[in-house]
Image (cartoon, rainbow, N blue to C red):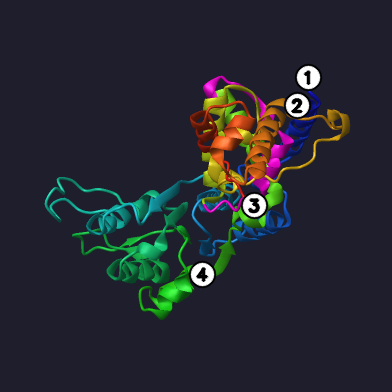
């Protein structure tokens, strides 16, 4: 086994050991960074009450996971956790979805139908993307929060309900209040206890743990045997900003498991955008005697890097003239151009 692979294997084994000790209150949420420890502490405190919670955070950070964790460790955990994505349901249907309807209340209402509030009675209702809720429904939601009762569509009879509401959004509700796109009174009713989920770029030390967890999941699911990510690949991913957060990372690991199938994932296996765009390689001096570094190397990466260096040395010597550089490398000019495109190499005089 190559030294680089051995080191990566030991690293991934260490991550497995670390990942076997999730937070006792939030086993579905992975993280040991300071921001995540603070989040776990908040979830533990919030779960002990029935106060309304507003979870804020960028898309892909895991807001529903946090909501489920609050429900699962609360006194309501024996009842339903009912999620509703307010942005995914058409405005004209959302009221019926939330409050239910009676037979004949509108075209297509062939029977009485229970809404999500009724389904969540004695349990938890999770209202995701609450910032997209229209003004008329905001008023009705406010009434439920104030009076703990609602009226199904088409009914004049109120129903009492005992529901804990957890709302979530990736939008800035305070700004929406300022622009009159969200009711101020509803905002304060929802944000009795605000919780913010940190973006992945603010808890980079959790990235290897998350990668290991997703790797195990997708290896089992696909019956593949990807052993892990090389140390260099982990460094690349830990330096990336992850605009799609944990969801983007999960997507990448699944893609890598499908494409790689087995072995270790090296930097050259990763999509270009994780490598910072076009590769501009400085030409370093080769180590004396071409000796193997003490910590070992990833052979594929080393061969690729060596080829890149020779190409760029030839371009440097010919001041970017591809025909002359190809002659120095005993290649056809078209072959050199194809290699430059394939490798995303860019000659620079700097």
Residue that numbered label 3 is attached to: 349
> Residue 184 bears which disc, if any?
none
Q: Where is residue 187 in the image (x, y as percent from the top left)?
A: 45, 73
Q: Are marks 1 and 2 in contact (CB under 8 Å)?
A: yes
Q: What stretch is highlighted in magenta?
A: 221-243
Q: Residue at x 45, y 65 (%)?
A: 171
Secondary element at tag 2: helix
Is 260 colored magenta in this rendering? Answer: no
Side of 88 where 255 appears, left or right: right
Residue that numbered label 4 is attached to: 191
Disc 2: CA contacts within 10 A as few (<14), some (14-19) or many (>=20): many
Q: Residue at x 23, y 54 (%)?
A: 101
Nearer-N-terminus badge (4/3) = 4
Q: Residue at x 34, y 64 (%)?
A: 133
Viewer-closest of 73 and 335: 335
Examine the rendering and report whether any part of residue 202 can be seen.
yes
Q: Is residue 141 above or below residue 338?
A: below
Mark 3 vs mark 2, foreground winner is 3
Nearer-N-terminus badge (3/2) = 2
Residue that numbered label 2 is attached to: 5
Residue that numbered label 1 is attached to: 1
Disc 1: CA contacts within 10 A as few (<14), some (14-19) or many (>=20): few
Disc 3: CA contacts within 10 A as few (<14), some (14-19) or many (>=20): few
């Amino acid at each position: 086994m190559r030294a680089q692979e051995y080191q990566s294997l030991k690293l991934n084994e260490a991550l497995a050991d670390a990942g076997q000790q999730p937070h006792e209150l939030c086993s579905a949420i992975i993280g040991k960074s300071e921001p995540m420890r603070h989040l776990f502490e908040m979830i533990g405190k919030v779960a002990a009450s029935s106060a309304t919670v507003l979870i804020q955070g960028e898309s892909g950070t895991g807001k529903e996971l946090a909501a489920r964790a609050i429900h699962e460790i609360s006194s309501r955990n024996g009842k339903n956790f009912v999620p509703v994505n307010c942005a995914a349901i058409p405005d004209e249907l959302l009221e019926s979805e939330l409050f239910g309807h009676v037979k004949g209340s509108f075209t297509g209402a062939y029977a009485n139908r229970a809404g999500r509030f009724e389904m969540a009675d004695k349990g938890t209702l999770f209202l995701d993307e609450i910032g997209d809720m229209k003004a008329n429904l905001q008023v009705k939601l406010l009434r439920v929060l104030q009076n703990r009762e609602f009226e199904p569509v088409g009914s004049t009879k109120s129903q009492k309900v005992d529901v804990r509401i957890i709302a979530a959004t990736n939008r800035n509700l305070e700004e929406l209040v300022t622009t009159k796109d969200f009711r101020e009174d509803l905002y304060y009713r929802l944000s009795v206890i605000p919780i913010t989920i940190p973006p992945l770029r603010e808890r980079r030390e959790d990235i290897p743990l998350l990668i290991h967890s997703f790797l195990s999941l997708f290896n089992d699911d696909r019956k593949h045997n990807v052993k892990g990510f090389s140390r260099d690949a982990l460094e690349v991913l830990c330096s990336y900003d992850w605009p799609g957060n944990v969801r983007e990372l999960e997507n990448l690991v699944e893609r890598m498991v499908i494409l790689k199938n087995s072995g270790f994932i090296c930097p050259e296996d990763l999509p270009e955008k994780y490598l910072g765009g076009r590769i501009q390689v400085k030409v370093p001096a080769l180590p004396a005697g071409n000796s193997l570094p003490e910590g070992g190397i990833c052979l594929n990466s080393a061969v690729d890097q060596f080829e890149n260096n020779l190409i760029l040395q030839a371009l440097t010597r010919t001041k970017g003239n591809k025909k002359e550089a190809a002659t120095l490398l005993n290649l056809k000019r078209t072959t050199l151009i194809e290699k430059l495109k394939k490798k995303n190499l860019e000659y620079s005089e700097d």
